[in-house]
Image: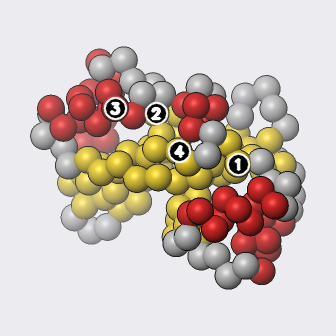
């Protein structure tokens, strides 16, 4: 139920994000979800792709610093309060959300939220016990 995520450290200057997306495109890698956080000099681009191994390979070949981490993807009703209900469940079990980002599935009433937790296995256990759908990596890569 864990999903592989790629993080790339980027200089905060014009064209760097375009360079990454072009390299992935040329490598035949499709981005499924992404999140970009910036600081003054560097940013961190986190994304989920259809082929993590290939993405890592082509980016490293082009001298990018790449880190692979595990996150989880949760299906959330796409309506007011959908996210609040899940965060309340996590709060009751004292699970910390380190960061998150979301996207809306095509042809579905649900959104998918990608979470990074301080205790990933505990979070998966708590969410599934509360009938929250935690998506497999294969499902997310194919969205």
Quadrant for the C terminus, please.
top right
Left or right position of 31 against 63: right
Q: Residue at x 72, y 28 (%)?
A: 106
Query: Where on the picture, by quarter, is residue 100?
Result: bottom right
| Crowdedness near tag 4: few (<14), some (14–19) or many (≥20) residues, C-alpha within 10 Å | many
Q: Earlier along the polypeptide chain: callout 3 or callout 4?
A: 4
Q: Is residue 13 visible?
A: no
For marks 3 and 2, give the CA distance.
9 Å
For marks 1 and 3, give the CA distance.
22 Å
Task: Please tell me whether mark 1 sits on a helix, a strand or a loop.
Answer: strand
| Crowdedness near tag 1: few (<14), some (14–19) or many (≥20) residues, C-alpha within 10 Å | many
Task: Please tell me whether mark 3 sits on a helix, a strand or a loop.
Answer: helix
Q: Nearer the viewer, mark 3 or mark 2?
A: 3
Q: Measured along the vertical axis of the image, is residue 65 above or below residue 59?
A: below
Q: Nearer the viewer, mark 2 or mark 1?
A: 1
Q: Which residue is mark 4?
A: 3
For marks 2 and 1, give the CA distance.
18 Å
For marks 3 and 4, give the CA distance.
13 Å
Query: Where on the picture, by quarter, is residue 57?
Result: top left
Q: Which residue is mark 2?
A: 49
Residue 135: percent from left, percent from top: 67, 42
Q: Which residue is mark 3?
A: 53
Q: Which residue is mark 1?
A: 134
Q: Earlier along the polypeptide chain: callout 4 or callout 2?
A: 4
Residue 105: percent from left, percent from top: 71, 34
Q: Is residue 47 visible?
A: yes
Q: Residue at x 82, y 47 (%)?
A: 78
Which is nearer the eye, 59 or 120?
120
Q: Earlier along the polypeptide chain: callout 2 or callout 1?
A: 2
């Amino acid at each position: 139920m864990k999903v592989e995520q790629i993080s790339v450290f980027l200089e905060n200057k014009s064209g760097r994000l375009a360079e990454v997306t072009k390299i992935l495109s040329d490598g035949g890698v499709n981005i499924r979800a992404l999140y970009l956080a910036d600081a003054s000099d560097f940013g961190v681009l986190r994304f989920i792709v259809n082929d993590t191994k290939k993405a890592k390979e082509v980016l490293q070949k082009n001298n990018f610093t790449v880190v692979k981490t595990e996150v989880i993807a949760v299906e959330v009703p796409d309506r007011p309060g959908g996210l609040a209900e899940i965060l309340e469940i996590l709060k009751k079990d004292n699970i910390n959300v380190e960061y998150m980002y979301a996207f809306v599935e095509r042809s579905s009433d649900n959104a998918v939220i990608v979470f990074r937790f301080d205790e990933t296995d505990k979070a998966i256990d708590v969410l599934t016990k509360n009938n929250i759908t935690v998506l497999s990596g294969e499902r997310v890569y194919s969205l």
